Image: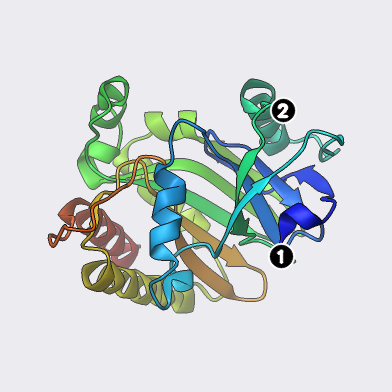
Amino acid sequence: MSFQQQQQQQAFFEQQISGHSIFIKLNDGEFVAKSHSIENNNEQNFYEWIQHIDGYQEFFSQYNGVVILEKNQEISKQETINSQQKWLDTLISKRYNPNNKKYLILENLTQNSSNLRILDLKLGYSVEKQSHIQRYQDSTSSKVGLRICGMKIQENNELVLFKDKHWGRTISVQELIESLKIFFSLKNRNQILKEAIEKLESLKQFIISHCKQVTSWQGTSLLLIYRDDNDFKIKLIDFSNTKVDLESTQINTEIIKALNSLQDIIKQI
């Protein structure tokens, strides 16, 4: 699909719950455009590499290349005012740069969804970036390799819970576990918990089999998404600090350790 050849109807992505990048929903919402730094090509390089691996879409957003979005039209906003929208408005005011025209085109993981539950878990026990070291040491990251960066729960298509990354940095491991219990508080809870454990195991095997070339997953998150039609999925997201070395033959054990930790917690709840 050539996005450059068509006029794009644009709206800020109302389901965004975390991150620094701006997401813009295009046309009917099948795709979202993620703002892309001109100076940092890590994420684009990662998607250009991973898209050639069969079955990658099971654990990663489908990648559809890069688009240049001209600033010749106004981008619409959600009119509903709630805690998530206030957070998103603040992010847009700080981060949206109309002069940044380069965007990655990704699958919209929440299209046509109702009563969404979304949880963004930052993976990893440590980080190289000096300004983030204390953040990891003082949070659940250093203890269980997981940190909540965003959480949203809808009931009757109304927002009933929203938590952002600042809250996630302050909570204890027990509070993280309680948050996972809330996320999985479903009528078909046991079925979805079993499915989550199985999907995590499949993701680990995918990484072990196909991702030896990824030498660093730092900054990567795992997105858990549950929809009202009993559809549950997990996706790895955020690759601006991910490094790919085509000569590497070693598995990155830190991400496997973090996924093991999440599996262990889910088995206990």
51 left or right of 172?
right
Name which of mark 2 and mark 1 comes first in the sequence. Answer: 2
- Give the label, 2 or 1, closer to the camera: 2
158 is higher (above) or lower (below) than 74:
below
User: Which image quarter is the C terminus in?
Assistant: bottom left
21 left or right of 264?
right
User: Which image quarter is the N terminus in?
Assistant: bottom right
186 left or right of 85?
left
For label 1, the SS is loop
Q: Which residue is mark 1?
A: 113
**Protein image colouring:** rainbow
Residue 100 at x, y percent in the picture: 64, 31
240 is higher (above) or lower (below) than 201:
above
Disc 2/disc 1 C-alpha distance (Å): 29 Å
**Residue that protrudes farthest toward the left in the picture:** 250
Residue 91 at x, y percent in the picture: 63, 28
Residue type beneath disc 2: Pro
For label 2, the SS is loop
Q: How many residues crowd around disc 2 within 10 Å: few (fewer than 14), some, or many (20 or more)?
A: few
Q: Tell me whether the residue at label 2 lies in contact with that at label 1, contact meaning CB atoms closer than 8 angstroms.
A: no
Residue at 84% across, 49% down: 9
Q: Which residue is mark 2?
A: 98
Residue at 86% across, 38% down: 79
Q: How many residues crowd around disc 1 within 10 Å: few (fewer than 14), some, or many (20 or more)?
A: some
Residue type beneath disc 1: Ser
Q: Quadrant of residue 97?
A: top right
Nearest the camera: 131 or 167?
Answer: 131
The numbered dot on residue 180 is none
93 left or right of 19?
right
Residue 71 at x, y percent in the picture: 79, 33
Residue 239 can be seen in this image: no
Residue 31 at x, y percent in the picture: 68, 59
